[in-house]
Amino acid sequence: MEHLKAFVDEEEGVGVVEIILILVVLISLVLIFKNQLTSLVNSIFKKIVSQSNSV
């Protein structure tokens, strides 16, 4: 029973490291493609505003 508890506790630490690595990758991608994402979001908002005026 103690081995099972130790295994579960050990896996939680790995989960935190994995989450941190995923966040680092996502933040890096956002920083790399910041200009493209900004222009995409702006064009989407412009389209939403123009189509909401027609409704």
Image (cartoon, grey):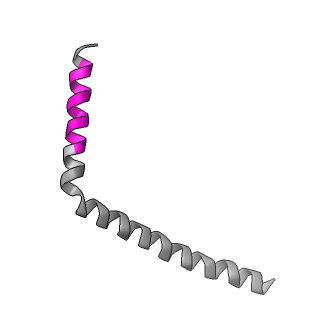
Q: Of residues 47 and 10, which is closer to you in this image?
A: 47
Q: Left or right of 9: which side holds 22? A: left
Looking at the figure, which quarter contains the N terminus? bottom right
Magenta region:
40-52
Q: Is residue 35 above or below residue 31?
A: above
Q: Which residue is at 36% across, 63% downward?
A: 26
Q: Could you tell me what secondary structure mostly forms the magenta stretch? A: helix
The residue lying furthest to the right in this view is 1
Q: Is residue 9 above or below residue 28?
A: below
Rendering coords of residue 31 (x, y %): 24, 63
The quadrant holding residue 7 is bottom right
Residue 24, image x, y percentages:
36, 70
Residue at image location 21% in from the left, 51% down from the top: 36
Q: Would you place residue 36 above or below residue 53 in this image?
A: below
Say which of 38 and 19 sits in front.
38
As drawn, the residue found furthest toward the top would be 55
On the picture, is 42 further left or further right than 17? left
Asked if the stretch drawn in magenta spans residue 48, the answer is: yes
Q: Position of 29 compared to 19: left or right?
A: left
Q: Quadrant of residue 39?
A: top left
Q: In percent of the image, x 22 and y 26: which residue is there?
A: 49
The mark total stands at 0
| Residue lying at 23% horizontally and 34% vertically, measured from the top left | 45
Q: Which percent across, then down, holds residue 50?
A: 21, 23
Residue 39, placed above or below residue 25? above
**For the C terminus, which image quadrant?**
top left
Residue 8 percent location from the top left of the image: 68, 77
